[in-house]
Image (spheres, grey):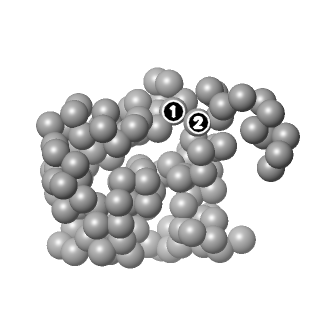
Amino acid sequence: MPSFAFQSKTYEVDDWGFLVRTQDWDEGFARGMASELGITGGLTYEHWGVIAYIRSRHAKTGECPPVYEAARHCHFKLHELKRLFPTGYLRGACKLAGLTFMEEQVHSSWLPAARFLSI
C-alpha cells in the first residue's frame, strides 16, 4: 500500500494519494499534502475554513458536501474555490480534508445497495 510522509509521520494512502482511513487525518496531513496539490506558501485561513466545513459536514452526515454547498457555506464563488484548490474540489479540498473522491466510500449512506454489488 502506498504511503505519504510528512514531518516524521506516515499516512497510508491509496494509489491517488487519498487517505485510506478518514480517521487517520490530522492537520499535518493537510499541510504536507498541500504542496503536492500545487498550493504554495502553505494553507491559509480560507483553505482551513473550507477543510473544516467539509470535515464537520462529513462528521455529522457521513457525506461529503457538494461543491456548491461548500462554496455557499464558506462564502466563495466557484472560481474562488478553484483558485484556492487548483486540483479541484474533490481532488483538492476533499483530499486535504481526508476524504476520498470514491463516491462509494464518501456517499455510501445514500447509494443504492445494487451499486455496491457491481463493484
* Residue at the right extreme of this rendering: 117
Q: Is residue 32 visible?
A: no
Which residue is rendered at x = 59% and y = 45% of the image? 103
Q: Considering depth in this image, is 30 or 72 the residue closer to the camera?
A: 72
Where residue 108 sits in the image (x, y, percent)? 65, 34
Q: Considering depth in this image, is 67 or 40 the residue closer to the camera?
A: 67
Where residue 68 sits, quadrant-wise, is top left
Which residue is rendered at x = 80% and y = 33% of the image? 114
The reply to whether the C-beta atoms of the residues labelled 1 and 2 are less than 8 Å apart is yes
Q: Is residue 40 above or below residue 90?
A: below
Provide the residue designation for mark 1. Answer: 63
Mark 1 or mark 2, earlier in chain: 1
Which residue is rendered at x = 63% and y = 56% of the image? 20
Indicate left or right for 119 with 89 as reference: right
Q: Is residue 76 above or below residue 44?
A: above
Where residue 25 sits in the image (x, y, percent)? 49, 51
Q: Which mark is residue 54?
A: none
Indicate left or right for 22 with 34 as reference: right
Mark 1 Cα within 10 Å, few/some/many (few <14, many 20+)? many
Alpha carbons under labels 1 and 2: distance apart: 5 Å
Secondary structure state at the residue bearing disc 1? loop
Q: Is residue 55 above or below residue 48?
A: above
Where residue 1 sits in the image (x, y, percent)? 71, 71
Q: Considering depth in this image, is 15 or 118 the residue closer to the camera?
A: 118
Amino acid at the residue labelled 2:
His
